[in-house]
Image (cartoon, rainbow, N blue to C red):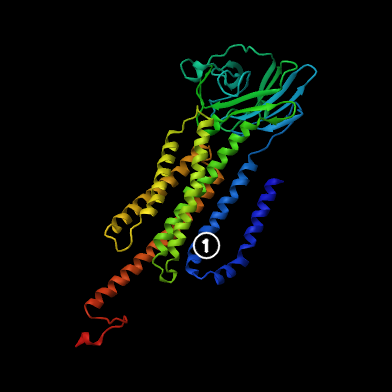
Amino acid sequence: MQSNSNTFNFIKMIQNIPPLIPFIHHNFHHSQFFTIMFPFFFSFLIFLSFFPFTIVFSSHCTTSTSTKKFDKCMPLPSQEASIAWTFHPHNATLDIVFFGSFISPSGWVGFGTNPSSAEMTGTRALIAFPDPNSGQLVLLPYIIDPSVKLQKNPLLSKPLDIHLLASSSTLYGGKMATIHNGATIQIYATLKLVPNRTKNVHFVWNRGIYVQGYSPTIHPTNINDLSSVATIDVLSGSQAICRNNFLTLKDVHGVINAISWGVILPVGAVTARYLRHIESLGPAWFYAHAGIQLSGILLGTVGFAIGIRLGQLSPGRVYGLHRKLGIATFILGMLQTLALFFRPKTTNKFRRYWKSYHHLVGYACVVLGVVNVFQGFEVMGEGRSYVKLAYCLCLSTLIGISVALEVNSWVVFCRKAKEEKLRREGLIGSSGKFSGSSHG
């Protein structure tokens, strides 16, 4: 229902745009600006509309399978996984099923609990993969110790030191199903919890692309695979606040930076380059350019600060390229902002050097910002998402507008240069008409 509501609200917003166009065009004194930028802002609205849609689309779970029904279910925050469970307070047992998917025909899918903390190290896991000999689905127990995480030793199956009463696994589709990229698996387990203790259980899950013998190899290390931990109260069915806050902070970081560094600053650059030559605008182009860029820098600073905080909350995760690009872009943005306070007058002999600096730093900031937005999509596991597609649509619209304006600028420049040449040769007068005396 939430997804339908978001879609309806966006359609309603789009329907309200056409009646506003004549009003804005009539009341906006510089209609050329509106004509140039409206297609971009329209595509930007489409870009923003995809954010709530994708969040709702990935949130789903079920309390029933083909063989069993459970009391509660919850979508997990990564890898499109989910769980369903029934807790029996009288004997402190937990019946649970994990829904995951393979990313390789020779890969593995694992699910388990960590008795002490919400992290991979120390997890007691059940890992399913195709048997190297028969190809049939097998489910074996593993303990993830620190040496395995550091890849010093292979991950070997061993009995679990927790009260695992029963376990099994099955592929979606029954006995006729085969393991392939995208194949859905269900891992069942019955656990005996400690009576009269807190019922917050640390769940850990992941998946990999290859199994060497009976030893699963390391999983991918993008944001989805490194965020596969959740602490859940099996009594109430609520997830720990801290984990939800981290994921929300991550989404906010991505949205703010995509809008500021990836959209607003490029729009400001286009505004300065192409609108300054429209004589009817006067100095309005400068105020528009400065306002757009300053708002983008302020918003980008908030996004940068959130990124620093995310790094503090997840010390084990290092995204080297994304982090370096982010720091470089932020430094360039600050240098560009500080340059406003040292802007020489037009008559100053250093004005041309300042303009060269301003153009070089500004364009470098815009390019690095856009590149880092795409790097951010990869880090967040959104490399093939509708959000990235919408951003590409938004960016390509701006590029298309820029190309059209660039071509128009060169046509106007060449025409004026030709007229100036003819004027110097006396072939045309100051009014632009051909002079008759040139034939005498």
- The residue pinned by badge 1 equals 38
Decide: is 107 above or below 423. Answer: above
Q: Give the residue furthest to the right.
A: 90
Residue 349 is at least partly visible in this image: yes
Number of other residues with Cα within 10 Å of mark 1, as a class: few under 14, some 14 to 19, many 20 or more:
few
Decide: is 317 above or below 439. Answer: above
Q: Secondary structure at mark 1?
A: helix
Q: How many marks?
A: 1
Residue 52 location in percent, x, y? 62, 46
Figure quadrant of residue 249: top right
Decide: is 92 above or below 276. Answer: above
Q: Nearer the viewer, residue 85 or 243?
A: 243
Residue 64 is at least partly visible in this image: no
Q: Nearer the viewer, residue 257 or 35?
A: 257
Residue 220 location in percent, x, y? 50, 29
Three-letter code, disc 1: Phe
Residue 342 location in percent, x, y? 35, 54
Residue at 53% across, 69% down: 28
